[in-house]
Image (cartoon, coloured by chain):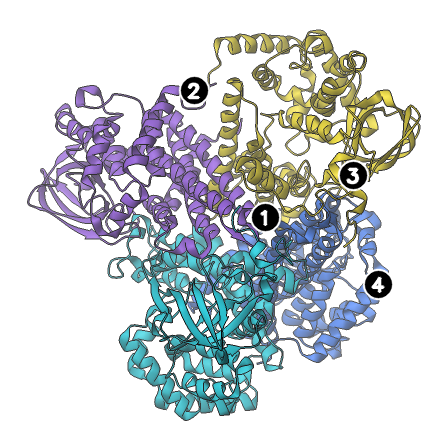
Chain colours: A cyan, B purple, C yellow, D blue
């Protein structure tokens, strides 16, 4: 039992570290390391986008982009463990890749698995190089947890498909050149069977992107509307009616982004509790009143950290990450909300303040308080994650499916 | 046993609900959230309904009714998450002046507060969790100096009740805010529908409110009473958040059925109902103690406060969860309740302070709780 | 808003109090008041049974038994509120009635609603007088939460029914003279439709009663086995196939036992915390480390108390207690287990001790620790209670019923 | 990175599982529960397998393996809820003698402990939650007097490590229990499968173990190490309780379907899986620190301890709930795990003490936890 690299891993780490040390945009370090958890996704203002593209291009040119992709499509053919090591070494600069993460982590692998060779050669290298940004258009207003309930219609017209409908929660749609799009091509069959996947040029006529203002006052996502959008049949990924299977490729690759563990916020709390004064002199951390909760959260944060170490160990032995990794988001999501709530209470009436210049600990807890409800929902609600753990890890039965084998168009849409 | 509001009080509540449903929709709350500032016309409407003077004697322009009527109306203000300074002006400032003010102070301010012509506020914290020992503002020979922050509704108030050191004692001080020597600066908070400000006093003219050295004790009395009233705001908000979640669970379909038919959602809503119900019962206990002037008030107030704080937070948080992604959009109202739940949890001092008060009071009473 | 009696209530209370003061078995007071929560149901040893019967008979003779029953069957025709007042005044002596509570609270009302006039006159007065003890035989090993899934078969044979099968969780079966018995008379129809109710003489041949040893080492319940038990058709309660409707009468009457609120154990904890020393001098209750949990439980205990006051107020206005009363057991069950666990932790290594002479606070917390898991199960599990609240209070849909309209014999019994 | 047991260690674990599955079924655990007393033949079997001497040097009759092997085997003893004094004799007494004993003390006792011929125990508490200040037993000039209770496995132990005051300092004392001057009395506890006793010493002959005045510090070291080993017992128990619940949820039908298809049950089991998994990962962290002698051991041990205590309790408690009424019968095994979960939670000092240690150690290190 140890945390040491194998000699091969150590050599790879050294190589990565030295390249990063020589090439990273160090002038961005203060911004990137100060961004705090829960906000890193929101740094993509214009300058940051340019910086992100520049760093991605530099990595691409030196063979450090999309490490796990085959070399012919712009990757390095690296092992999953090498990818993890790279991520560890890239550190704060990895935040610059958030813009590309959906394209490189989900859309690219889908195109790689299901696209024509011509598409792959044309589309993948610019994606790896950060020249193109991609988005993933699956969710709809009426199809969230029940993704296969989506209603965006694709109707065949000669060699083209005509798309009408809308998507929601599309990260980066406003800055994307391409996207993958899951549509319903046959509403007369059971819901999972009538879906078809395409890739689309986001600059096509018939696409309108509108940002969604979220509860915390920021816009991380978009709605995308399709009005008679025409897509050539050659942009189909997989067979007609095979869209659900294709989408599983996309979603399974989401799971591979292991090691990018979410934070519970406990380190921030401990940092605060060690620095902030208690009510009667001494440090906040010495107040017995908060001990039990600190201890509980400490074990959760530590448990997630070492669970991810165990997953990495499995990965280094060649095992694939499984559904048990759902616990990361489940635990971190709920815990970060609890911690934020607790921390603002410790600030008394000043806990309401949100200006980093005025609020305690630079308003980090207030930012998390306002952002955290989304964490328990996005990318799989707590309830869906518990279902996944119960069904796929523990082998318990699925929920009763009243819509099973029912033609999609007969599934009730109102109570 | 009549451990409930009576018919008359319930009618009064209905009146408030009708008024607020018509005049204080969440669209109107949003205006405050989105920078529309203080909704003075709504405030005037509320004043004209008499809601600001419910517990103010008729001789001072109020309705001269009891605290139960005020509790009932507070619940409706909570349901409506009204973007109004009722907590500061009615539950705190008016109560302070009524309880500790001289006849002159009462006749100067109470009629104005009842009429909505003046807004009061309480200025106690100085930028950290308040204790008896970290008050730095000073009051000497009628002159107040120091900085109070955050002051709820301090951005719009006309008069403040300020906790300050008078020599080595703590006193409450009544300060007209429309004078030189008072400056204010608005603060960004998690709930912009109830504004907060930093108030700075530079040798501002003030009058002592109540006895010298009684400031801390009187503040506790005020906070206990206000805690009961705020608990009603909180249970009103909790109930509405629960109802929103329930309605959405009935309406939203997934996997071919109402999401409310999934036990994960059903049981989440059942748990919300449980905490809202316990909080309501505890709030009634507080209302009984407040309205009868019972010796149990400190204990009942702390019980109501802790219970209602937890319930409103729980319901507001899980209402978002029931709504899924839609619940976290700006356009849906869920976040208005989440913001208010957290704002009210921090007003009057936060949960750890009230937990401490509750346990100390229970231990002092050393009387088993359950009959 | 007040806790005062109306003049009528005050008069009734005074009458009850003075009769109790003159007649109660005061020599039992020390035993009854020292029995502690969680154990009161287990005091029915031989002497206590005789004492219980004697007190019941005394009440019956003076018109204080089964207050809400009509006078002709041995009751007093009292209002629900008078019954509550009686219970308050009876105080610790009410524990003597636990032996009769199922008979008088559930079986009696069922016979009253569905039995023949002859049966009512023969059976109810001795039940009210405490001469007869009754038990309720509904649950089965394979029919707990899903009560209507019961399998005990009743087959018509001339004017008699022949019963085979078994029941479980039958309180008091070993000391009962009579019982009500829910059986399946037609397995070819949907499960709720093939049930029929009977009353039975527990001394009939073909009945065997065996106590169940429970996890905490005590026996509060029995199993009852039926082997060719014969019951005359005249002992049928309600129509053939109407058993489910009849059982709802029984269960609805269970709900009427309002005011007998369950304890969270918080008073015991507070009592302990006020008396026990903290770790560094002072009282345990002054330890800031335990404050937040004490406060939380205090609000739960208080919330239940005043919820029951609100329910009593509604009762006094003539409203029927509804499903919202399920919260009492739901909250008290979980809370009492949490409190017991917490309290033994405060005792450190000595928390394991169970001998009242050696353990802290007379081993009350250890007793609750061992007993409390059952509280979250018996009389409706936490999960069933949440369903009841969600469905009957909040109006949410029922669970998907795969066995709906399926003939009972076709419902799968194995996965 | 190899943050896992290696193949050899896992094989060792499998061996322990095979042995315990065959020899230590819950029927055998029940014998102890139902008054059958100490199962000496099972203990001898365990000794013959070498499990008692895993971390004892070969020169003293042990296997001379590392702590990782001992952790792996501890997990299996936890799964089997073995009714044996392994915690007292192996994790505590042997470790104490190995770490602090003289060469003579080691060669006298370690071979006997490894062979199962002597059973050791730790006697620290004196009837209340132990602190450095409430030790009253005295050790003067080789004579020990005082009363220790409860002492885990004190009813069957041959030798005790006793915490006592030596003058105004605390020392550990090694006492042969087979002498006049030692009396013992069995105690009733929540888990009779691991006996406890009051040990009374009346001028009993003892030898100091380790330095004078180092008693408290050495005790903490012992407790930290044992906490890691007990954490493995706890995660073994938690896993088995989870599996029992899962299996029952698959098998038990209600409303025409497996109860495991109801989200209330599914999600309860998912949450049990989550806490068991976090506890396992923390236990591995502890094992790493223990086996490498890392400076983080105190922190890692407290983390493993708190996490495993909560997880085992959580899984044992909800396993009963999944089983419904059947789960609370004597005949089902659920309560064996519930008893053991609570027994282990109290051994070595209870949760509040370990929470305090954890937070103090985190604060002292002041190093953020997550990488």
Please tell me how crowded label 2 is: few (under 14), some (14-19), or many (20+) other residues with Cα within 10 Å. Answer: some
Residue D253, horizontal then vertical, whole percent: 74, 49
Please tell me how crowded label 4 is: few (under 14), some (14-19), or many (20+) other residues with Cα within 10 Å. Answer: some
**Tag 1 residue:** B263
Q: From the viewer's perspective, tell me whether residue D111 is left or right of residue B90.
A: right
Q: From the viewer's perspective, tell me whether residue A32 is left or right of residue B242.
A: left
Residue D121, horizontal then vertical, whole percent: 70, 59
Which of the chains bears the disc numbered 3?
A: C
Identify the residue at image location x=48%, y=79%: A235
Query: Of the residues tagged 4 and 2, which is closer to the observer?
Result: 2
Q: Earlier in the sequence, mark 2 or mark 3?
A: 2
Query: Of the residues tagged 1 and 4, which is closer to the observer?
Result: 1
Query: Could you tell me if residue D306 is visible in this image?
Result: no
Q: Give me the C-alpha separation between circle 1 and circle 4.
A: 42 Å
Q: Give me the C-alpha separation between circle 3 and circle 4.
A: 49 Å
| Circle number at residue D23 | 4
**Tag 3 residue:** C189
**Tag 2 residue:** C2
Q: From the viewer's perspective, tell me whether residue B191 is left or right of residue B7.
A: left
Query: Of the residues tagged 2 and 3, which is closer to the observer?
Result: 3
Which of the chains bears the disc numbered 4?
A: D
Q: Tag 4's secondary structure?
A: helix
Identify the residue at image location x=39%, y=20%: B7
Which of the chains bears the disc numbered 2?
A: C
Q: From the viewer's perspective, tell me whether residue B23 is left or right of residue C309.
A: left
Most foreground residue, B126 or B226: B226
| Circle number at residue C234 | none
The reply to the same-chain question for discs 4 and 2 is no
Most foreground residue, C413 or C81: C413
């Amino acid at each position: 039992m140890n945390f040491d690299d194998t000699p091969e891993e150590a050599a790879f780490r050294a190589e990565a570290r030295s390249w990063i040390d020589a090439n990273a945009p160090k002038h961005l370090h203060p911004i990137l390391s100060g961004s705090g958890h829960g906000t890193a996704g929101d740094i993509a203002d214009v300058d940051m986008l340019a910086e992100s593209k520049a760093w991605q291009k530099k990595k691409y040119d030196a063979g450090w982009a999309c490490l796990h992709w085959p070399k012919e499509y712009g990757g390095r053919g690296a092992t999953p463990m090498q990818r993890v090591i790279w991520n560890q070494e890239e550190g704060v600069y990895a935040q610059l890749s958030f813009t590309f993460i959906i394209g490189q982590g989900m859309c690219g692998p889908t195109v790689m698995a299901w696209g024509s060779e011509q598409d792959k050669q044309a589309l993948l290298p610019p994606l790896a190089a950060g020249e193109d940004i991609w988005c993933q258009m699956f969710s709809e207003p009426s199809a969230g947890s029940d993704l296969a309930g989506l209603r965006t219609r694709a109707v065949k017209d000669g060699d083209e498909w005509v798309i009408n409908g809308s998507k929601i929660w599309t990260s980066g749609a406003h800055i994307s050149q391409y996207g993958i799009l899951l549509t319903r091509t046959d509403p007369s069959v059971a819901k999972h069977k009538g879906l078809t996947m395409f890739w689309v040029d986001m600059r096509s006529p018939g696409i309108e992107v509108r940002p969604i203002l979220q509860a915390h006052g920021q816009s991380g996502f978009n709605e995308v509307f399709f009005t008679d959008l025409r897509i050539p049949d050659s942009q189909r990924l997989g067979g007609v009616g095979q869209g659900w299977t294709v989408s599983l490729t996309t979603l399974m690759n989401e799971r591979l982004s292991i090691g990018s563990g979410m934070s519970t916020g406990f380190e921030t709390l401990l940092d605060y509790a060690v620095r902030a004064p208690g009510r009667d002199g001494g440090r906040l951390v010495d107040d017995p009143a908060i001990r039990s909760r600190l201890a509980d959260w400490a074990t959760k944060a530590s448990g997630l950290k070492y669970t991810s170490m165990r997953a990495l160990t499995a990965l280094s032995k060649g095992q694939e990450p499984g559904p048990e990794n759902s616990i990361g988001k489940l635990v971190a999501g709920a815990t970060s909300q609890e911690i934020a709530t607790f921390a603002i209470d410790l600030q008394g009436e000043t806990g309401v303040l949100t200006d980093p210049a005025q609020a305690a600990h630079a308003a980090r807890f207030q930012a998390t308080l306002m952002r955290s409800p989304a964490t328990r929902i996005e990318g799989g609600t707590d309830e869906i994650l518990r279902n996944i753990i119960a069904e796929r890890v523990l082998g318990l039965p699925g929920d009763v499916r009243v819509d099973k084998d029912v033609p999609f168009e007969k599934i009730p849409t109102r109570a | 046993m009549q451990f409930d509001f009576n018919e008359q009080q319930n009618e009064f509540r209905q009146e408030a609900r009708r008024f607020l449903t018509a005049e204080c929709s969440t669209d109107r709350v949003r205006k405050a959230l989105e920078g529309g500032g203080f909704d003075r016309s709504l405030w005037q409407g509320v004043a004209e309904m008499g809601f600001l003077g419910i517990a103010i004697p008729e001789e001072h322009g109020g309705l001269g009714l009891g605290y139960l009527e005020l509790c009932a109306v507070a619940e409706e203000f909570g349901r409506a998450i009204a973007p109004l300074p009722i907590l500061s002006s009615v539950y705190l400032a008016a109560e302070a002046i009524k309880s500790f003010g001289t006849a002159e102070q009462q006749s100067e301010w109470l009629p104005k507060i009842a009429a909505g012509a003046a807004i009061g506020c309480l200025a106690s914290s100085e930028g950290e969790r308040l204790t008896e020992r970290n008050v730095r503002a000073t009051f000497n020979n009628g002159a107040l100096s120091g900085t109070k922050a955050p002051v709820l509704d301090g951005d719009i108030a006309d008069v403040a009740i300020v906790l300050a050191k008078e020599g080595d004692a703590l006193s409450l001080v009544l300060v007209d805010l429309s004078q030189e020597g008072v400056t204010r600066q608005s603060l960004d908070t998690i709930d912009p529908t109830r504004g907060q400000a930093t108030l700075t006093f530079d040798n501002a003219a003030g009058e002592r409110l109540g006895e010298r050295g009684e400031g801390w004790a009187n503040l506790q009395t005020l906070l206990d009473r206000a805690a009961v009233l705020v608990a009603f705001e909180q249970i009103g908000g909790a109930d509405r958040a629960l109802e929103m979640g329930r309605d959405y669970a009935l309406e939203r379909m997934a996997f071919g059925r109402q999401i409310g038919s999934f036990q994960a959602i059903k049981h989440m809503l059942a748990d919300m109902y449980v905490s809202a119900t316990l909080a309501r019962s505890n709030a009634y206990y507080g209302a009984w103690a407040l309205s009868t002037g019972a010796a149990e008030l400190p204990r009942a107030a702390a019980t109501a406060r802790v219970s209602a704080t937890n319930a409103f937070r729980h319901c507001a948080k899980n209402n978002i969860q029931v709504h899924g992604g839609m619940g976290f959009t700006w356009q849906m109202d869920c976040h208005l309740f989440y913001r208010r739940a957290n704002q009210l949890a921090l007003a009057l001092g936060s949960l750890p302070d009230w937990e401490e008060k509750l346990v100390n009071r229970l231990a002092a009473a050393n009387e088993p709780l359950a009959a």
